[in-house]
Structures are given as structure tokens and as C-alpha cells.
Image: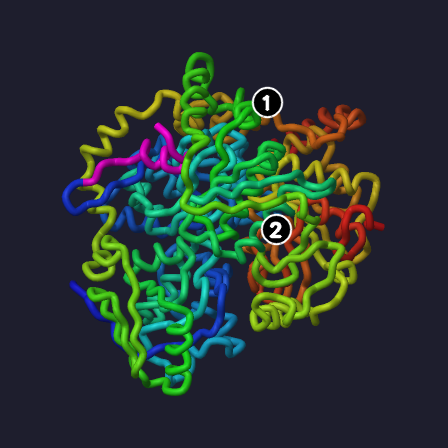
Amino acid sequence: MTGTMFEKILDKHRVAGSGEVPDRLYVDLHLVHDLSPQAFAGLRSKGRSVRRTDLTLATADHGVSTRGLGGPGTALTNQLQALQGNCKDFGIPLYGMGSAGQGIVHVIAPELGLTQPGMVIACGDSHTPTHGALGALGFGIGTSDVEHVLATQCLVMPELKSMRVNLTGALPDGVTGKDLALALVAHFNAGDARGHVIEFQGEAVAQLTVEERLTLCNLSAEMGARAALISPDERTLAYLKGRRHAPKGDLWDQAVMEWMRTASDIDAVFDTEVDFDVSRCLPTVTWGTTPAMSVGVNGRVPHPEETNNPEAARRALLYMGLAGGEKISDIGIDVVFIGSCANGRLGDLRAAANVLEGRHIAQGVRGLVVPGSRAVKLAAEAEGLDRVFMEAGFEWREPGCSMCLGMNDDILGPGQRCAATSNRNFEGRQGPGGRTHLVSPRIAAATALSGRIADVERAA
Amino acid sequence: MMRTTIAGRMVPLDRDGVDTDTMMPQEFLKGTDMEGFGKAVFHHWRQSGQIPLDDPVRAGARVLVAGRNFGIGSSREHAVWGLAQWGFEAVVAVEFGDIFASNCVKNGIAPIAVREEECRDLRQLTESDPLAPVTIDLWGCRLWAAGISASFTLAPIIQRMLIEGLDEIALTETLLDSIEAYERDRPPWEPTTSALERGPENPGMKTRVPLQGLPGTPLPAGRPERSGTNHAAPTATKKRNSEEQ
């Protein structure tokens, strides 16, 4: 079989249609969280059950309190209660609040080894392309499709184009996978990759750690792509081997053979080709209200007329409380948030802690670290990262989505300004009136030290 | 019930890159039912007068006319429920976010993609004459409004969904034999989640995931193992145990 990895995965998951019913796509793993209770209501109203509870995993992430169980404001929300009840009623395995495996869906599935090359993964969350870092085709879906997958383990076969994004060159020192991702989001103007499944290829991909690849594929949602993929390589296999749900023994060998056959062939033809030189990437920060509105941290906020959409820039600057033209390093910050499915993994916490070690965040800055999962939290604590953060003045929280989207009590107040390692800076994303600047973990840490958006070298 | 035509007045939204967070802010996502989203849709922009959904002259409009790249970001279907419950049956824009467009179709809202100048002409028409109607022919894939005419494309299955209101899940259920045949041939190494419940680490979810659950996580280049912090592990472990008990 020759072709792109995307085509091969679709072909392998094709459930033949019949008559007027088009082909379906079989879903190997369905990740469920607390934000889709209406899907279960839909099942109940039609008397349907969950077809494959053994291919479904639920966890509590979007709305969980990160203050732990039992404290003030930590009562289970209606949605978390509903999740517990629905998982019990329908027989779905649940990593609930306080459980050992709980965490953000897109953090726990890779770390458990549930995300494997060649799989189709669906989740009612737009950041499901994250799993493409390990070669799994991850589709974010709405509540109707969550119900569809619960009931049938299938989705309608998507009609999408393939795009190769060839990443050439090497990232400069101090420039991370997050900065690369933000540069690509700007290249695609927060949506121009729509209708496509991106495959990232090239020498720069080979140099990225798996965690950085997870970040890159996570942000493909902000590029507008329907999904993203990276063909498996040695780093993929090294990451997977020994993980709890990874195949063992002979099955591992069989799986590896098949995974490598799933990779795109050298002569595969993509519908769209993009070349991108990563050596021009800079440590990056967003200044506006889409993740495409970004600039180097050592630069200036653009004037509207310097952008490709002055009207949109004017409105974004108004919302952000910026005039245009100010130095990025003059922008004061109220809150620093480190976490999310973009940057809530162990490597992200290490990168931030590395900058913070032995120092203290600026007066008046509130710092929040929310590990992406309980496993990340425990691993970080075993290394003493929790002490580094707390001694630096950060709050060390329980895992969840937290201030990425403000579904719990971790929200910005109106006008508050936050440097966040998450993936969206839309108006009100972190709380009504809140202002978000997206950055990498190391820039977030440097910014916390300085009290103003700062590159690592410039941190006070 | 067949519906081949959507006809009615418009609401203009001269914006590019409208995200679904803006359509349905997260503070309205906390319920467990499907009520009340029509009042919440575009809440903050309505409060600040950035979209005229509460202007009496717009009451009863059926078609939202936006700009480029409409419906980016979050997969939250609540945004579409909000549009539908407000009364919209179609959104006209230059392009749509993929998941948003898919969610629209599942809720009977037609995502109609036309050229940028056609979008602009429609917005200008309804801005100058809020009572001007637009007619969208889902069967012929054309729309008309006061001298403006545009064509668009709909994939055949999308067209059927919009016209016939098909139940996709019921259609998939007719393929049960194919699904079962597919399942018999799945590779033996593909993971299942049922082991989560049986696993010794996981009874009642009280105990921890073993740290060897995270093998091979590479240290950043040039960063040595923390020598001083190996001592910290037992302390951290003890602290966690006491918290859990």
C-alpha cells in the first residue's frame, strides 16, 4: 500500500456503507469528559446503550476544581455528578476526581499508552488532534457525534484533504515546540488549514521530543486543521514502549511492524504542500484575541495598519487594553498560568521550573501551576518540582483543564492580564473580560519572575 | 419533514474569525440539559452592542451573515444550539471551522459558504434594509436577495441531512453487520480500557498510577538529573499518602 498515513488510516477503519448510507469510520478509542452530559441524555431518550465500553474512557477534566477534594468550592458540579452517574449507568470506565488516573483527556491517553500509531481516536474536544503526535488520527467532535460514537463506535467517514507541512531547519536555542506551533498558527492565520489533515514532516520534526510533538499537534486545532499526524519514528516507539497499555512481547513486535507500515510513504502525494523554515522561529507571545495574533517576545505590539487585517487588529487591541506599538516587555501581567493539554506535561513543568529554581515571582503576580494529570503531578513531585514552584511563589494545584477555559473557579477577573501556556486567547476565554497572552512554559516562568512579559534571559 | 428552502430576514455580523467561545461563553456550558442557549448566544457581544440580536427589528430573522472563517476554535455544540434556539436556520460566511460546520448540519442549521464579496453585499443589504429577505434553495444550491445571487456547494450527504433531517445514528445502526465484521478483524494489540477497571493499580481509583507509567520521558537537553531532589521523593510520597488517607 502506498499513500499518506491519513489515507491508510482511513482505509483501515472503513466500515462499508450500504445503499444510501455512506461509509463509516471505526473509532478505536473514545475519550469522554464532563462537558458532554447531553450525549447521554440523547442515548437515554432513544433507549440506546454504549456499544463498546471497553473502547471508551471517561475522565473528569473540564470543570474539576484544582483545589483538591474536600476544600471550599470543591463540591462536585452538576456535570461531574452527571458524569459519575452516566459512567455507572452505561458501564464506562471512569477516572473520576481524586482518582489515580485522572487528568486532561489529551494528557492521560498518551501517558497510559492508550494512544498508539494508526488508531482513530475521537473526543468531544477540539484538541483531539493532539494524539497525532503519536501517529493516531484524533478527531474533535461535537456532542451529537459523541452520542453517535457512544451508540455505534463509528463516525461518518470524513471528506478531508491531506496537507504535508515540511518543517525544515532547526529551532534556535531557547525556542520551543510551543513557539513553533504559534508561528504555524500565525502562518495559517488561525484557520487556513481548514478541511485538511496536516502531516508534519521534516528534519525539524525528528528533533522534537514527543511532548513537543504533542504540543505542536495540539495547536493544529488553532491552525484550523481537522487533525494532525506525525508518522511514527524511533522517538515514538521509545515513548510508547513499556507504557501500561502498549503492547507487550510478541504483540509489541507485530504492532511495531504494522505501525511503521502505516507511516506515509516517501512518494505519497498530498493535496497541499507547505514548506516552513523553523530556524526563523522566535520565543513568541500572542498580543490579540486569536492565537494567530503573535509576535516575538522581544518585539513590539503591532499597530493595526501593520497587520493583514487592521480592523480585526484594532478590535483585538481594544479588548486587550493595548494601543499598538508598545514594547512587549513593557506589558505587565497579573496572573501566570502553567498547564493545559497544550503545555501541562512533565517536560513543560521541568522547563518552567528550570527558569524558576531559586527565584521568586514578582510582587503582585499570581502564579498557578496545574499539572495535566495526576501522573504528571506525582512525577513532578517525585523530582521536587512542586517545591521549586511553591518556593517561587506559585500555587501547586490538582490536575484539570483549569484556567485554560475557566469552567471551574480558576478564572480571570475583568481586565486581568494573564500569560498562559494554553492554546486559546479568545475574548473571555479565561473569564469574562480577561486578557490572555499565550506563551511557552519557559516564557511563562520568566514572565512570572519579571512581572512583565519577558524572555528568559531578561528575567529579573 | 422535508425542507428545501430557508427564507427570511438576516442579521449582519461583519467580523472575521468568530470563535465558538464568543458564540457561547464558557459560563453558559455548565448545565446538563439543552435549554436556554438562545438567550446566551453571543452574550457578551450582545451586552456590548456588537451584534444586534436584541434589536426588535431583527426579531424573527433566520439567517446570520458573517465574514471569513466563521466558527473557529472549540468543538462546543452549545454554540450551534444557541444559534438554533435563537431562531437561525442558516449561517452565511466565506469559510467555516470544520467542527462548527459539522455541528451546524446535525442541528439543522445550513452552513452556506459564498464568496467574500457576496457576503459583504448581503451584509450591506441587511444593514441598509433590515426587512430585506434572503431565500436559500438547499436543493438548487443558490441564494437570492434583492438583486444579489450566489451559488454554493453542499456535499450530497450534507444536503440530505439539511433537507431530510436524517438521523445519522439510526443510519449507522443499519450497518450493524458491517460493524461487527470490522470488529472481528481488529488487530489484537489495540488497547482496551476495560483493563483500567481490573488493574491492581486501579481498584476504586484510590491508589496511584505507578511512576513507571511514565517511562522514557526525556529530560530536556543539557539538563542533568536533579541530584538534590532525589531526596525529595520520599517526602513527597509521604505527604501524598497522608493527604489521601
**Do callouts 1 and 2 mark residues in contact (Cβ within 8 Å)?**
no
What residue is shown at x 24% (from left), y 41% (from top)?
Answer: A23
Q: Is B210 situated above or below A81?
A: above
At 61% from the left edge and 24% from the top edge, which residue is drawn?
B216
Q: Secondary structure at mark 1?
A: helix
Q: Which residues are magenta?
A: A1-17
Residue A12 is inside the magenta segment: yes
One can see residue A375 in this view: no
Q: Which residue is label 2 attached to?
A: A183
Question: At which x and y percent is residue B175?
Answer: 19, 38
- Tell me, yes or no, whether the highlighted magenta stretch contains residue A171: no
Residue B55 position by quadrant: bottom left
**Residue B1 left/right relative to A53:** left
Element assignment for label 2: helix
Q: Is residue B133 left or right of residue B54?
A: left
> Which three-letter amino acid code belongs to the residue tagged 2?
Ala
Residue under circle 1? B212
Across and down, in percent, residue A200 comes to 52, 39
Residue A225 locus on image (x, y percent): 46, 49
- Looking at the image, which residue is at 44% across and 61% down? B71
Which label number is shown at residue A289? Answer: none
Residue type, mark 1 in image: Gln
Tell me where residue B61 sits by quadrant: bottom left
- The chain containing the residue under callout 1 comes to B
Crowdedness near tag 1: few (<14), some (14–19) or many (≥20) residues, C-alpha within 10 Å:
few
Residue at the far left in the pictured view? A19
Residue with the most extreme front position: A267
Quarter occupied by the C terminus of chain B: top right
* Along the line of sight, the residue nearer the viewer: B218 or B59: B218
Asked if badges 1 and 2 are on one and the same chain, I answer: no
The chain holding disc 2 is: A
